[in-house]
Image: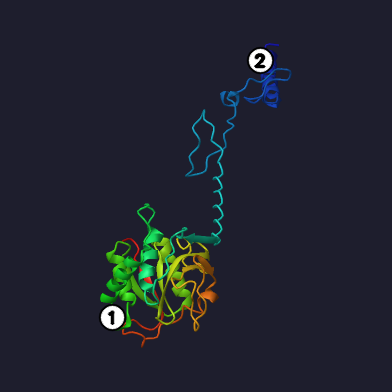
Amino acid sequence: MTGARPRLLAWLVALATCLGACAPAVGINEAPAGQAVPASPAQQAPASTAPPSATGLALEPQGTTAAAPTAAPTPAPPPAPAPPPVPQPYALNLYQEGDFVPQYTFDWCVAASIQMAHNLIDDTGGGTWADSTQQGELWEMARARSSNSYNGANPFGWAQVLTEVGVGPYTVVSIADYGAALQTAARAIADTGRPVGLVMWSGRHAWVMSGFESIGDPARFPEFSVTGVRVQDPLYPHGSGQWGPSPEPNSLLTPEQLATQFVVREPRRWSSELPAGYLLVLPVAGA
């Protein structure tokens, strides 16, 4: 019996060891059945909701919200260009009742035209120039200032006397084109407020252009067209058997009607360095 007890004790120890080796091991993260497994510190921390940042890209600072990109404003379309101005009918006339003066002899057309030019621009009430004695004096002045007094008073003497008596200054021009001559005369009246002298009948007679009608204001439209010409013929009512009747004072002639008597000056009529063309005794602008 004494030897059996130690053997029994040794057998029990071996049996206990065998049973311990056959029992399933419980992991460190596992709990026995029916018992909750406590979470590890890493498992207890809330998972981050921020996506991982790409290399080289900065993350928005925590606590801020990235602003949504805004589209650039669309530029307003440029305003449509204004339509070009359209020339309208235009009229200018310096004539007033009493401005007309007849020539008192068949030679004094230049002197009578000088008197009418004074009347057309004199709005001071200083008196109308219409005296026959004065007309004779103006004729002699114009003859004395002309290049060939044998032919009477020519356009150069006409222009010089206009300047000397305070109506000018004036100059003499020759223009080859008829339409351009009418435009030049109309523009001079509009610019200066003074009449233009027309050398009529190839250089034999003097008229005064006191106004005009046109399509377009000369101050706004360089290429305006003259549609009518206001004239004063000091020979009225006599006229000419060769050139036709004299128009009434302040008549409005069409360019075609004027062209029957306003023609190119003949160079042989009187000596001049001016080329052949339509001759104007023209007021100088800005004087």
Q: In the image, what residue type sits under mark 2? A: Pro
Nearer the observer: mark 2 or 1; the answer is 1
User: What residue does disc 2 label?
Assistant: 6
| Above or below, comparing residue 20 to residue 183 in the picture | above
Residue at the spot x=45%, y=79% of the render?
177
Position of residue 82 measured from the top left corner of the image (x, y, whole percent):
55, 56
Q: Secondary structure under badge 2?
A: helix
Residue at mark 2 to residue at mark 1: CA–CA distance: 180 Å
| Front residue of this view, candidates 226 and 145 | 145
| Mark with earlier residue (2, 1) | 2
Image quadrant holding the C terminus, namely bottom left
| Label 1 crowd bin: few (<14), some (14–19), many (20+), radius 10 Å | some
Q: What residue is rendered at 55% in x and 41% in y? A: 70
Q: Which residue is mark 1?
A: 149
Q: Position of residue 118 (x, y in %)?
A: 36, 62
Residue 42 is at least partly visible in this image? yes
* Image quarter in which the N terminus is found: top right
Residue at the top extreme, as displayed? 2
At label 2, counting other C-alpha atoms closer than 10 Å, the crowd grade (few under 14, some 14-19, many 20 or more) is few
